[in-house]
Structure formats: structure tokens, C-alpha cells
């Protein structure tokens, strides 16, 4: 009976999304020029996605064959379903995003409120589709197989897609961004989003494939694997404990839908406040529903308290991120001040900020682990993770709003819309930077808790009594897990550089060979840039992908299940620390630059500004590529360990 | 009987040092001008050391009182002895360093060979005093108490001094360096080591207190605590296994003394080759002696093999460091190339290099752990660590040679010696950069293995059967250990910035208020700068010091011995990774800049050079302050845990 809630809520969310899609697409898309630009972005984004899916297809086919022979047909199907639904969520989200962008620009002609309305509705579609499809997939699999273990393959499928979407999307977005800026802004001196820049469409595509599709896949994965881990860990406590995760997932989706109605601009015209009201409403409604469900299923409130811990983490982690990255805070001001003595001190200051920002986040995670364990043991930790992730729909909605407004601004610029429109989209975009940072903090914390839940499920699956750090193979595993996260980050930092380089060369070539381009008399070859970026990003997927999949298998089969446990623990701890350092430092550098651009410390063009631009350049691949990609990395490592736990236990060398 | 070797070898090393000191000080110190400069450096260095000791005195007094009441009088005395001998080693080393510098400059008037001879003899004094005093201290304590547990206090004393010397010295050296360069080179356009620069003496003092005294204290600690840990772990195997560490320590000191005779310049005039011959000779002689001792004490070679693993790590780790940081290698060239597109890409490239350089080092450490454990269990790991550290005398000798030649160059510049002398000291100094990087790699690897040995000893002391990562308090400990290393690094990065700022202000003030300074008609107030740097560095000691001492006690007493074990493991893994990242990236940035300065990619003054200078600025506090300070941090955490193991087990909350 209870399982029906999972179906009802997820289908409700999907239907509501369909309604929103209809609402958005029936709005005016503006002038022919605007539609033309929007179509170019749409085309580029879809070209990237299709090529990405095409690249992944053989991998999915091979892996499902492996799963079929190693396990059974259900696991193989679950895997395909997980990969497919994750891909579908990204596809839908991105396609609504590239339609909402031009309509947001058009609505900007009227007023801020209308523009916010379209942009947030667009974001809501992505959010609800992510949560809805993930919940629907896990619920269906469990309903038809009546075996939680059969859902693990689903999680693995989601993991794999998430890794590739985050890595590929992250490289794409930053390579295009750097490529467009380096030649356009720096060498040619033309403004951002100028239509003469051949990489301008690729840059706008990047916002969608990186920030929208990449983030969607990441949270789809966190949500799905945490559901699965919680259900696995609930098995020892009977069927209600297995169903509870699905039920609170269902409740929180309903809460998210209701929450979207609270996003309204009041007279203060404070956009962030409007969005935050939606988050708060979702959290409060979820808490009430969790209370009722817990009481109904368990007749006691311990598990409710554990879920409450997760909801609290959602709120607190966004405060911490904001504290370190908001433009009006001391931390960012300190970096801006340090820019006065040059780029060197700007970088040192930012690195120091990133490193120390790990501390409060880790304390929060520690407190959450401690409290949720206190209430309900290891199952409690998974429930806390799920409590946090249950509001994914709302969080993704707030996040996906970002690239839509960013794109809207670009379209306004390129189509030469009146100054007023650009002002409106700029206001929306500024808040988009905050929401981006806040969601990143959420995604990192969620990934850490999701990975921990998987880690606990792994330990149960292998029947390990202990993972003993006093054993030499576990120590070795711990070191290996730490080293993998560092190496992975390094690979991505370099990949962005290489990919950006190939775009810079192409943009330079176009400026040199296309006559009349600088004078605006000839059109650049946008598609060529989109194509090069796509190829470059996909080429860079391979090595990090192999590292993520092969290293846990190598450690597991060579050194045994306990060593692999050590590796998982090592990767979670260092992955969390590195991810926080990189994303916080990156966001702070970005905002320090913007703070100076607002006219402080000499403003645009001053020496301090030049130094801050360098800091921002360093922060870009850190915050948008390497840092976020650590989330799927630690989940993939744990997911693979969980999936292959039995085989490793039976066949490892040690 | 066997224990006599420890006495004989350490006293032999100290007597030989005395001979070297006599040899060095009886050489000509050059002109009155040179002596004047050298005296200023000497005065400044001693002023810093005395102030540092004075600051530490109350801490030592309070802590020895705590140890007296918590344990017994022997532990308190052992603690004082450890702190005193560590301080003494630094004091002697630094004082010979500030005497050898001017004599190296003077010998440079003759030829390269003579200059190398003085500089390396000066370094040898520090090396032999460090190894000799550490071995003498541990041997005496064990001889008089016949109880290994009584030596733990000695290790704690050494740890504490090491932490403060590394942190204080590291902040001092970089703050003075940045302060001197920023105003002198950048703002006023006068060359490095120009006597008109008020911070020039402080800068030279910094080389001694940071690179010489700081490194000496670090390796004194690693050496002492590894000896102690190995003896503790040997207890279960009987008295020979307890004496073995002291015996191979004694053997390796003799080997180091013999090794110094192999440091001779051949016709190729390759200085690094001359130094490397000394290292190789020491390693080979040590290996032969270890073989004889193992066979004599155990009649089998398993323990010998474990010690051989350590010696192998010494050689391989220097190769890895060299691979990533040497000027003629691909890795550094890549950073130099990246400088062509600006400071941003230079920084990204350097960060990526630092992050990925962790991988081979971690693989090496993993292999060493695996092999030494295979041969002799946990005891084998400690023996491997000791095998590595046994050649400390030689390694410190090669390292301390660096600041001596650096100073010699400064004196030659300030005293206006002929161009030929400066050329000689420049050649010596260039190799000093390689030896510095190589020793840093050694110190990091040694610290990791030393900390692991302490960790194993901690587990034995607490009678823990397991440190189980599946337990929630251990997971929390793991996160806490990781977070402490990140926060600690951040504190040090900021501290350098703050301290440098106060020196910059003072140097600017002097240039503004002292008339005729720029024209060379008036003398700057060197002492004022030395004084300000000293104060600033010591002020910054407090917070990181408290963090290092209080955090393991907090975790231990709140969450119990097993959680503390998790914290230790977490700190070792992340501390190792962060330390490698920071020091390798820093050295690579430095050498990328030097590579460009040699005339490549546009040479000095080009845009690429400007970008590389920024990279070097970022690398400075990373490689000379934060990175190296992580070594004592992870040892201090483990040492405190070991020392308080019994109390924590009896009184912790959980």
C-alpha cells in the first residue's frame, strides 16, 4: 500500500512538470533575431548531449553485458534504466532551459517579476523531473522485483551517467568560457556575449550542459543512491523501514511542488529572498509530512529526528557557503583587499579561504553523522542523507534558474534588446551566482552523506564485521583513496586547459580569416566552435572515467574487501575536503572580482581588478569542473564497490 | 652491551662535528665589511632563536608540570631533555651556518672546490649534531631507565619544538623574503641582496631560521620519534628487537660520517653529483652494516629487508621530487609554457602538477608499507621508517648546505666582492634549490612513515584490537583529522601574508624617512626589520600551536581512543597529500620562473616571466611554510595521542 505513494507523488511531479513545460513554451519567444540565437544555443546543446549519449552508449552496452553475466538480467535492466532515466532527466531539463532562456529575456521587457516567473518555472521543471524520475525508477524497480538488491544496478547506471555528465559538462562549460573570454574580452576588447565572438554560442551552451544538465545528473544520482542505500540499510528493521525512504521521498516531492508557489517577489524586490522562501516552505512542509509518516509507520519519532537532521543540514550548509562566498561578506572582501598587492596575494588569500572553509562544513557533517546515528544508528545516517536530499526538487529548481537567466542576459545582449531588459536579466543573474554557490555546497554535502550511506551499505553487503585501520591493507586502501581524489582533480584541471586551448586557436583563426567579422559585417561560424568544444570535452572524459571505474576494482580484487573499504573511506574524506576547498575558493575569487567591478578598490581596469581577474581564472576550473566532479567520483567509487562487493569477496587475491 | 654502540656512535658524531666546527671557524672570514654583514645576520638569527626559546620556555615549563602530575618525574624530565636537545641541535646548526656563510664567500675568491668544501662542512655539522643528539638522548634515557615507555616524553619534547620551529621559522623566512622583494625588487627596482634594502638582513636571517633550524628540528623529531616507536613496537619480540633500532641508528651515523668524505667535486664540476655521491655512499655503507647487525641479532634477514625498504625509499623519493621539480624536466617546462598565456594558466598548471605529484609518492609509500609489513609486520614498517631516517645526518648535511651558500651569495653581493665570487656562490646556490626540494620530499616521506609508526605504537599502547571505520566515532575522527590539516595549512598561508605586510610597511617607511638611503649615503635600520619579523612570526605561532595540541585531546577525551585513532589516520593521509601538493607545486613554480630567467620563452621582463613571478609568489608560502609545517603537525598529533593514550582510555566521555 504505502509504496503507492511513491508512484503517485512521482507521477504527480512529472505531470506538474508537463504543465509547466506547456506554460513556458506557450509564451512569446520574442523577435526573429532572439529566436535565431536561442535556436543556435538549443542546437548546440542538443548536439553536445547527443554526442555525449552516443559516446556513452557503447559503454552502457558493454557494462550491461558485464552485469548480465556477472549477476543477472534484472541488474542489467536496472542499470540501463538508471542510466536512461538520468540521461532523460538531463535531456528534459536542458531542453526546457534552452526554451525558457529566450522567454525570460522577452518577459524582461515587461518587468522583473515576469522574468523571474519564467526563469524559475523553467528551473522547476528540471528540479521536479530529476526528483520525479529518480523516485519513479527506484519505486518501480522495487515494486516489480520486491528485492532492494535489484535496485543497486539502477544506482550504478545513475552514477555512471552522473560522472560523465559532470566531467564532460564541466570541461565543456569552462573551456568555452575561457576560450570566449581570452580572445574576445582580453585580446579583441569586445564585451561579453558579443555576437561577433565565434565562441559566444558555445559559451551559452556550456551554461546549460555544465550547470543545468551536469548538476541535474549529479543530484539525480545522489538522490537515487541514497534512496537505495537507505532501503538496503533498512532491511534489518523490517519492511516499514525499507518503505520509509520511498515515502519521505514522495512527501518531499509534494512539498517541493507546493514550495514553488512560495517563490514570489515581494515589494522589496529581493530575488534571493523570493527563492529562499520557496526553500524554507519546502523544508517546513517536508518536516511536517515526515513527522506524520514516521509516527504512522514506527509509532516513535527517532527516525523522524534523523530525517530532521538532514533538513537542518540543507539550511545550515547554505548559510556556511554564503558566509564564505557572498560579495557583501568579510571573507570575500579580504580577497578583494589582497588584490591590491597583486595577483599573487589574491591567489594566496583565496586558497587560504578555500582551505579553511572546509572546517565548518566538516563540523556540520560530523554533527549530522553523530546526531542521526544517535537517533537511529547507521540507518539514521542514511535517513539524514535522504532528509537532506528529499528537497532536491526544490534545490535543483533554484539552481537551474541560474543558467536560464545567464542565457537570457546573453540573448538580450546579442539581440540588442533595450538596456532595461539587460538590467533585469543582470539582476536575476547576480542572484544566480549566489544560488549556484549555495547549490554547490548542497551538492557536496549531499554527495558526502550519500557516499557514506553507500559505504555503510557496502559494509553490510560484504558482511564485514569491521574495517580496521590497524590492518596494513586498510591503511594502504586509505592512502589509495586519498590519492585518487587528488589525481582526479589534477586531471580535470589540466583537461580544461587543453580544451580551452583548442577553442582559443579556433576563435583566433576565425577572427583572422573571416573578413568583416570585427566590423559586424560577417557572421562567425558558431557551430564550428560548438563542435570543437564538444569533441575536446568528450575526449577528456576517458582517462578520469577509467580511473574512477578501474581503481576501486583494482584495490578490491588485489587487496580484498576490507582494503577497498579503507579506500572508500579515504576517498570520501579527502574528496569532501578537496571539493569544498575548490568550489568555495572559486566562488570567492569570482565574487571578489565582481565586488571590485562594482567600483570598489579602484573598480574595473584598476591593478586590483587585473589581479582579481587572474584569481577568477584560476577559480573557474576549480569551482566549475574539478570541484563538482569530485561529487560523482566519490559516489561512483562507493557504488562500484557496493555492486561488486560479492564478487570481490569471492575472488580477491588477499 | 649492544647499547654501547648508541653511545659510541653518537659521541663520535658529536666529536667529529666539533672538529668540523674548529676547522670552519679557523678559516679566514674575509674583509671587515664581510664580517660586519655576517655579524648582523648572526645577531639577527640569534635574536630570533632566543626570543623563540623564551616564548617556548613557559610552555615547556607548564607542560612538564602537567606531565609530572599526570605521569611521573621521568616523563617530565624526558620531555625537557627532548625539547632541550632539539633546541640545542637547532642552535648549534644555525650558529655554524651563520659562520660558514661568510667563510664560503671568502673561499669563493679562490675556487668553487674550496667554497663547496666550507659550505658542505658547515652543513655536515648540522646533520651530525641532529642525528647525534637525537640518538644520544634516546639511548641515554633508555639506558638509565631501562624502560622504553620513558622515552615517549623525549619524543613529545622534540615534537613540540619541531612544530614551533617549523611554523615560526617558516613564517619568518617567507615574510622577510616577500617583504624584502616586494618593496626592494618590485617597488624600488633595486637588485636582490642589495645592502640598501632594510629587510635584506632579515631575509638572510630567514634562510637560516627557516631552512636550517626549521628543517633540523623537523628531522630531529622524525628521527627521535621513529626510534622510539620502533623500540616500543619491538618490545613484543624481545630485547634484541628493542635494541635493533638504536644499533642501526648508530651504524648509519658512522656511515654518514664516512659518507661526507665522498662529497668531492670531480673534473665535471657537477656539484649535485658530488653531493649525491655522499648520499649514495652513506646508503650503501648503511645497508652493509644493517645486514651485519640483523644477522648478528636475529640470525635471519627479514628485518634487514625491512630496513632496506626504508633506504630504497630515500633514493626513490628524491628521484620523484626531482622529476616534478627540476628545471630541465618536462613537468616544470609545462608550467613555464603555461606562463605564456598569463598568470592564471601558470597557476592552474602548477596546482595540477602539485595535485598529481602526490600519486607516485603515495604509491611509493604504499609499496614500502606493504613490503616492510610483509617482512616483519608492524615492527617492519617502523624499521623501514627508521631505515629511511637513519641517513638523516647526511640528508640534513646536504640540506643545510643550501642556506649557507644562499647567505654566501648575499654577503658577496652586499660586500661588493668581485663578480667571480658571486658566480661561484650562484652555482652553489642553484644546486641548493635542488637539494632543498629533494630534502623536502625526504622530510615529508619520513614524517609520514614516522607518524605511521607512532600510530601503530598508539594502537599498541591503548590495547586497541581494531580501529574500525564502520564505527561512527571513528568516521567522525577520520573527518576531523582531515579537516585539521586543511585548517592548519590555511592558518599558515594567511599568517605569512599578515607578517609580510607588517614588514612591507616598515621597509616603505624606512625608504621614505631615511634620507640618502636610495643613494647609498645612509644605512638602513636592519635591526628594526629583524625585530619586526621576529615579533610577527612568533605572534602567528599561537593559533596553529593550540590547534595542533588541543584537537587530538578534544577528540580523544570526547569521543574515545578509537575515534582518536581515526583522527590520526585521517591526518596522516590528508597531511601527506597536502604537504606533497604544496611543496612540489611551490618548487615547480620557482623553477619554472628560473627556467624563464635563463632566457627561455622571452626571458626576464617578458610577459611570461611576469606570470611566472606571480606563480612563484603563490608557491613561496606553500612550499616553505604551510607544506613543511604539515610534517611536524601529523607527528605532534600522533605523539600527543601516544603520550596521553592511557589517560584518554581511562577518562574519555564515550
Image: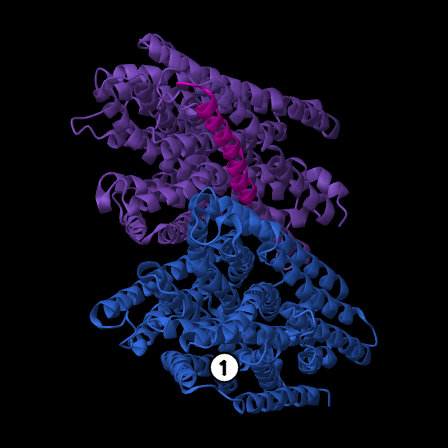
Chain colours: A purple, B blue
* Front one among A284 and B134: B134
Q: Chain of mark 1?
A: B
Specify whether residue B613 is in view.
yes
* Front one among A92 and A640: A92
Residue at 23% x, 25% y is: A423
Quadrant of res B445? bottom right
Residue situated furthest right in the rendering: B299
The correct choice, above or below, for A97 with respect to A326 in the image is: above
Residue A74 image point, x, y percent: 67, 23
* Front one among A123 and B595: B595
Specify whether residue A453 is in view.
no
Secondary structure of the residue carrying numbered label 1: helix
Residue at 68% x, 46% y is: A555
Residue at 46% x, 25% y is: A512
Residue A298 image point, x, y percent: 45, 35
Q: Is residue B629 left or right of residue B191?
A: right
Q: Main secondary structure of the magenta part?
A: helix
Q: Is residue B612 left or right of residue A276?
A: right
The correct choice, above or below, for B626 with respect to A408 in the image is: below
Binning the other alpha carbons within 10 Å of mark 1 as few (below 14), some (14 to 19) or many (20 upward) gives many
Q: How many numbered callouts?
A: 1
Residue situated furthest left in the rendering: A267
The correct choice, above or below, for A545 with respect to B621 in the image is: above
Q: Is residue B100 magenta?
A: no
* Front one among A323 and A518: A518
The correct choice, above or below, for A589 with respect to A44 in the image is: below
Residue at 30% x, 29% y is: A429
Q: Is residue A509 magenta?
A: yes
Q: Which residues are magenta?
A: A489-516
Residue A477 image point, x, y percent: 64, 51
Residue B649 image point, x, y percent: 52, 68
What residue would you read off at disc 1?
A: B79
Amino acid at each position: 500500500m504505502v509504496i503507492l505513494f511513491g508512484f503517485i507523488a512521482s507521477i504527480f511531479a512529472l505531470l506538474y512538470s508537463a504543465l509547466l513545460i506547456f506554460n513556458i513554451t506557450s509564451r512569446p519567444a520574442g523577435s526573429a533575431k532572439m529566436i535565431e540565437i536561442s535556436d543556435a544555443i538549443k542546437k548546440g546543446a542538443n548536439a553536445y548531449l547527443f554526442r555525449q549519449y552516443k559516446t556513452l552508449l557503447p559503454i552502457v552496452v558493454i557494462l550491461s553485458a558485464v552485469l548480465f553475466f556477472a549477476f543477472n538480467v534484472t541488474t542489467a535492466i536496472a542499470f540501463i534504466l538508471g542510466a536512461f532515466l538520468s540521461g532523460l532527466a538531463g535531456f528534459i531539463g536542458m531542453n526546457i532551459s534552452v526554451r525558457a532562456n529566450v522567454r525570460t529575456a522577452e518577459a524582461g521587457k515587461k518587468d522583473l517579476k515576469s522574468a523571474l516567473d519564467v526563469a524559475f518555472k523553467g528551473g522547476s521543471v528540471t528540479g521536479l523531473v530529476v526528483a520525479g524520475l529518480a523516485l519513479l525508477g527506484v519505486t518501480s524497480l522495487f515494486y516489480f522485483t520486491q528485492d532492494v538488491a535489484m535496485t543497486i544496478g539502477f544506482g550504478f547506471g545513475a552514477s555512471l551517467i552522473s560522472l560523465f555528465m559532470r566531467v564532460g559538462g564541466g570541461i565543456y562549460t569552462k573551456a568555452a568560457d575561457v576560450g570566449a573570454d581570452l580572445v574576445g574580452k582580453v585580446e579583441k576588447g569586445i564585451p561579453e556575449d558579443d555576437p561577433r565572438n565565434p565562441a559566444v554560442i558555445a559559451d551559452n551552451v556550456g551554461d546549460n550542459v555544465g550547470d543545468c544538465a551536469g548538476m541535474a545528473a549529479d543530484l539525480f544520482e545522489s538522490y537515487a543512491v541514497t534512496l537505495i542505500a537507505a532501503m538496503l540499510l533498512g532491511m534489518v528493521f523490517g519492511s516499514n523501514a525499507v518503505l520509509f525512504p520511498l515515502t519521505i521521498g514522495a512527501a518531499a516531492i509534494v512539498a517541493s511542488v507546493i514550495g514553488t508557489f512560495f517563490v514570489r517577489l515581494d515589494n522589496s524586490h529581493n530575488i534571493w529572498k523570493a527563492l529562499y522562501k520557496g526553500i524554507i516552505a519546502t523544508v517546513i512542509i517536508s518536516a511536517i509530512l515526515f513527522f506524520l509518516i514516521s509516527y504512522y509507520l514506527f509509532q516513535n519519532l527517532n527516525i523522524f529526528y534523523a530525517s530532521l537532521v538532514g533538513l537542518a543540514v540543507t539550511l545550515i550548509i547554505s548559510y556556511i557557503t554564503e558566509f564564505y562566498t557572498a560579495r557583501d561578506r568579510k571573507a570575500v572582501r579580504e580577497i578583494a583587499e589582497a588584490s591590491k598587492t597583486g595577483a599573487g596575494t589574491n591567489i594566496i588569500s583565496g586558497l587560504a579561504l578555500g582551505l579553511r572553509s572546509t572546517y565548518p562544513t566538516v563540523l556540520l557533517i560530523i554533527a549530522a553523522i553523530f546526531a542521526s546515528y544517535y537517533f537511529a544508528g547507521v540507518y539514521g545516517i542514511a535517513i539524514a542523507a535522504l532528509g537532506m536530499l528529499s528537497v532536491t526538487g526544490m534545490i535543483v529548481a533554484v539552481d537551474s534558474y541560474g543558467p536560464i537567466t545567464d542565457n537570457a542576459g546573453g540573448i538580450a545582449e546579442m539581440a540588442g534588446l533595450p538596456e532595461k531588459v539587460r538590467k533585469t536579466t543582470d539582476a536575476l543573474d547576480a542572484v544566480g551566482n549566489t544560488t549556484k554557490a549555495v547549490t554547490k555546497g548542497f551538492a557536496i554535502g549531499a554527495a558526502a552523506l550519500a557516499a557514506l550511506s553507500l559505504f555503510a551499505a557496502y559494509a553490510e553487503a560484504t558482511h564485514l564485521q569491521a574495517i580496521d585501520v590497524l590492518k596494513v591493507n586498510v591503511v594502504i586502501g586509505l592512502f589509495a583513496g586519498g590519492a585518487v581524489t587528488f589525481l582526479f582533480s589534477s586531471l580535470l584541471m589540466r583537461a580544461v586547459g587543453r580544451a580551452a586551448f583548442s577553442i582559443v586557436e579556433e576563435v583566433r583563426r576565425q577572427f583572422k580569416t573571416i573578413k568583416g567579422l570585427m566590423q559586424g559585417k560577417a557572421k562567425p561560424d558558431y557551430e564550428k566552435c560548438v563542435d570543437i568544444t564538444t569533441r575536446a570535452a568528450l575526449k577528456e572524459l576517458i582517462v578520469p572515467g577509467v580511473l574512477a571505474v578501474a581503481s576501486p576494482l583494482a584495490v578490491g580484487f588485489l587487496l580484498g574487501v576490507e582494503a577497498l573499504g579503507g579506500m572508500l573511506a579515504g576517498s570520501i574524506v579527502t574528496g569532501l575536503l578537496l571539493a569544498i576547498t575548490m568550489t568555495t575558493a572559486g566562488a570567492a575569487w569570482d565574487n571578489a572580482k565582481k565586488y571590485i567591478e562594482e567600483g570598489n578598490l579602484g573598480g574595473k581596469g584598476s591593478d586590483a581588478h587585473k589581479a582579481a581577474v587572474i584569481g577568477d581564472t584560476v577559480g573557474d576550473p576549480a569551482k566549475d569542473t574539478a570541484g563538482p566532479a569530485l561529487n560523482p567520483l566519490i559516489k561512483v567509487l562507493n557504488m562500484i564497490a557496493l555492486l561488486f562487493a560479492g564478487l570481490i569477496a569471492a575472488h580477491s587475491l588477499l
